[in-house]
Amino acid sequence: VLTAIEKLNKAKVSLYIMNYNIETLTHDGKINPMSQFMITILAEVARMERKTIKERMESGYNNFRANNGKVGRKTGYRKSEEQFLEQYKDVIRLLKKGVSLRDISNATGISVNTIRKCKTFI
């Protein structure tokens, strides 16, 4: 965050953060020291909060695993290649015709990522 703001400041582009009513440059194009101070503090608080969330998540997973819980996909969740090809045969047909991923997605309502996965099978 701070690196991006520094690049914007060097390019004389003022960043306005509406939630906190902070502008990184003054009206004459100089760096606003108070906004730099606030942004630095907010970025550090966000980093600490993210670290805390990660630690809590990891602690929860470890606790769940310690109580004989299983994390991840359920057994048998994945489809075989034959089942996958059968389910998405229309997508495969369109891919073979050379239709774009986005056009196939719009026509079938299937996500682009699923269509990309289908493309690996042809």
Image (spheres, rainbow, N blue to C red):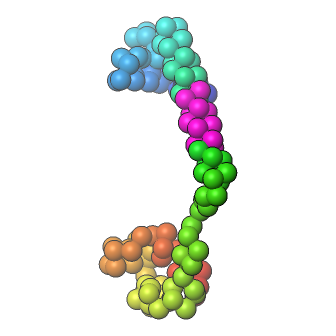
Task: Tell me which residue sits at (39%, 78%) in the image.
Answer: 104
Locate residue 111: give its quadrant: bottom left
Q: Left or right of 27: which side holds 115?
A: right
Number of labels in the image equals 0
**Quadrant containing the N terminus in the rendered view:** top right
- The overriding secondary structure of the stretch rendered in magenta is helix
Residue 60 coordinates in the image, percent (x, y): 59, 44
Judge by depth and name the residue closer to the eye, 55 or 40.
55
Can residue 14 be seen here? The reply is yes
Task: Tell me which residue sits at (47%, 91%) in the image.
Answer: 86
Can residue 30 be seen here? The reply is no
Q: Left or right of 30: which side holds 19?
A: left
Residue 68 coordinates in the image, percent (x, y): 64, 58
Task: Tell me which residue sits at (52%, 8%) in the image.
Answer: 33
Residue 40 coordinates in the image, percent (x, y): 56, 18
Judge by depth and name the residue closer to the eye, 96 or 119.
119
Task: Tell me which residue sits at (67%, 51%) in the image.
Answer: 66
Q: Is residue 16 above or below residue 121?
A: above
Residue 80 coordinates in the image, percent (x, y): 57, 86
Q: Left or right of 18: which side holds 101?
A: right
Judge by depth and name the residue closer to the eye, 42 or 98.
42
Q: Is residue 99 above or below residue 6?
A: below
Locate residue 21: give its quadrant: top left
Residue 111 lies within the magenta run: no
Residue 51 lies within the magenta run: yes
The span shown in magenta is 48-59
**Quadrant containing the C terminus in the rendered view:** bottom right
